[in-house]
Amino acid sequence: MSLLRDYEIRLEVFKCSPHSESVGCLVDLGQDIREVMPYLNGVLKRCRYNPDAPTLEITHEERSFALWAKRIAFGGVAGYDEAERAMQSVQQLINDTWARRDEITPSERRGANLSPLTLFKLLPGLNCGECGETGCLAFAAKLAREKASVDRCTPLTRPDHIECRTALVGLLVEAGYGVPEDWC
């Protein structure tokens, strides 16, 4: 049986960007989905989970969603049709995960939202360009969006940067980012 069966989409212009061409969506759910959150957190990489609220922030098909027990919010859609397609995709993700819950280990991992500045502070700061970027901040920005892999920073392989590497890799792993196996 499907967990999430019905919902109602409301499009809203966010007050912080009233002249934007895209709108935000608030979706009121006909069912309580809190029980699926730890399972989603167990199968998706970059989640931020707060079991006390409960809330779960996920990225699905390159769009960010915030899930509550009876509401989902997301932004950046051009209109109702795009919002409906995005919501149908999340509904399928929720229902597929719920159907496979016996095969999934639920996770209480809270995750972290890693900013480029947080990652930049853990890089060697050499601005050497060996990673292919103009400097460490540009590399950190791509790393935060998972558009670059940490192993592109070759100075992190040197003994004098092992502390930076250990801290950076630990943070990335805890947040659910992909890290090459030989870097863990």
Image: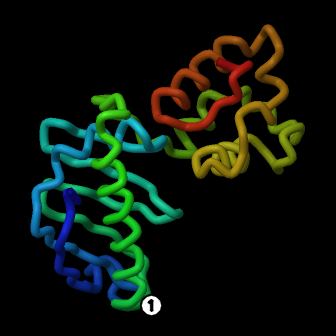
Q: Position of residue 141 (x, y in %)?
A: 64, 50
Residue shown at 21% from the left, 63% from the top: 4
**Residue 49 % position (x, y):** 29, 40
Pointer 1 residue: 21
Identify the coloring. rainbow
Position above or below: 125 against 137? above
**Residue 17 spot, x, y in % from top left:** 36, 81
Rendered position, 127 above or below 57: above
- Looking at the rendering, which quadrant does residue 80 occupy? bottom left
Left or right: where does residue 55 sit relative to residue 106? left
Report whether residue 5 is seen. yes
Mark 1 residue element: loop
Taking depth in this image into account, of 163 and 7 the one nearest to the observer is 7
> For the point 28% across and 85% down, which residue is it?
13
Q: Residues within 10 Å of mark 1 (few under 14, many from 20)?
A: few
- Between 119 and 29, the one lying in front of the other is 29
154 left or right, relative to 178 = right
Q: How far across and down, in percent of the image, does residue 178 sit?
A: 61, 36
Identify which residue is drawn at 33% across, 51% down: 57
Q: Label 1 amino acid?
A: Glu
Q: Quadrant of residue 122?
A: top right
